């Protein structure tokens, strides 16, 4: 058997690093929660994500009613109700391959649909995508300079007990560059860490920001394309 060596694109680092994230918050239809969770855990987490090229880490999270009650505001452009979205899925994608995902993911989803593996009944999806987005990775803010602490690439593999996600949607009138939003966000979280206002076990806060992919990219039809959003996960 001939095995071709792995090659890198010119100028691309061979070091392991996050290039982008896929974040998906889903609300199953009432009465289908257990069925959806079983399907995603046993099949889709692997067949629809982790076995695809360039996905190198992933983890699922669940929001109980107690945790949903902590969300704010009650209604926003992000979601009509903060009670929606009980399953959160987070994935890291290898650097320099975000646009490459379009044909690969489109082909995979098409094949899974043809094989009856997309959790559908007839033409009705038994779930709602409250928030689903590919997001270029803008960087990380660490709580402290601890060489022994997990790095950002380990965040989805380390056994953290929970995750807090914040989504910021700027006013459409604003012409501020996305890099400025990220800079503001990084400074905000750094101050929270320094003043201990952000009380969490995580030693870091990751900053993906949303970007619309090129026209051939797959996107769930019920999720509006909003490119002026940034997210944080701590």
Image (spheres, rainbow, N blue to C red):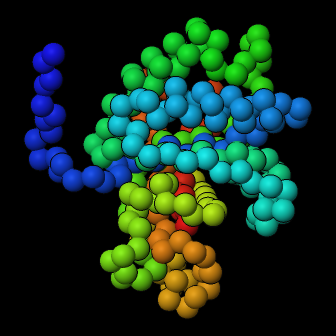
Q: Which residue is drawn at 47% across and 19% down?
A: 108
Query: Which residue occupies the foreground of this view, 84 or 163?
Result: 163
Q: In which quarter of the image is residue 213?
A: top left
* Direction from residue 124 to residue 153 in the image, left or right: left
Q: In which quarter of the image is the C terminus?
A: bottom right
Q: Residue furthest bottom?
A: 195
The quadrant in which the N terminus is found is top left
Q: Is residue 14 above or below residue 99?
A: below
Image x and y of residue 168, in percent: 59, 61
Q: Using the image, determine if residue 207 lies above or below residue 78.
A: below
Image check: 39 left or right of 190? right
Foreground pick, 57 / 190? 57
Compared across the picture, whether 219 is left or right of 135 comes to right
Q: Can residue 170 be seen in this view?
A: no
Q: Please provide percent x and percent y for residue 107.
A: 45, 17
Q: Identify whether 74 is placed above or below 95.
A: below
* Residue name at image x 13 percent, y 18 percent: 2
Q: Is residue 40 visible?
A: yes
Percent position of residue 66, x then y: 84, 62
Q: Quadrant of residue 44?
A: top right
């Amino acid at each position: 058997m001939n095995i071709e060596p792995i090659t890198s694109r010119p100028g691309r680092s061979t070091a392991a690093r996050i290039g982008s994230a896929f974040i998906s918050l889903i609300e199953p239809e009432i009465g289908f929660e257990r069925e959806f969770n079983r399907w995603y855990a046993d099949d889709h987490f692997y067949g629809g994500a982790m076995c695809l090229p360039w996905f190198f880490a992933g983890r699922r999270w669940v929001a109980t009613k107690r945790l949903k009650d902590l969300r704010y505001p009650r209604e926003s452009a992000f979601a009509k109700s903060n009670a929606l979205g009980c399953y959160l899925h987070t994935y890291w994608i290898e650097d320099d391959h975000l646009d490459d995902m379009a044909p690969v993911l489109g082909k995979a989803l098409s094949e899974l649909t043809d094989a009856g593996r997309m959790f559908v009944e007839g033409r009705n999806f038994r779930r709602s995508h409250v928030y689903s987005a590919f997001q270029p990775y803008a960087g990380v803010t660490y709580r402290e300079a601890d060489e022994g602490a997990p790095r950002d690439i380990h965040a989805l593999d380390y056994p953290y007990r929970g995750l807090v996600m914040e989504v910021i949607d700027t006013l459409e009138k604003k012409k501020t560059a996305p890099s400025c939003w990220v800079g503001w966000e990084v400074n905000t979280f750094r101050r929270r860490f320094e003043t201990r206002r952000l009380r969490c076990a995580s030693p870091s806060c990751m900053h993906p920001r949303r970007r619309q992919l090129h026209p051939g990219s797959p996107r769930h039809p019920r999720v509006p394309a909003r490119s002026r959003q940034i997210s944080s996960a701590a």
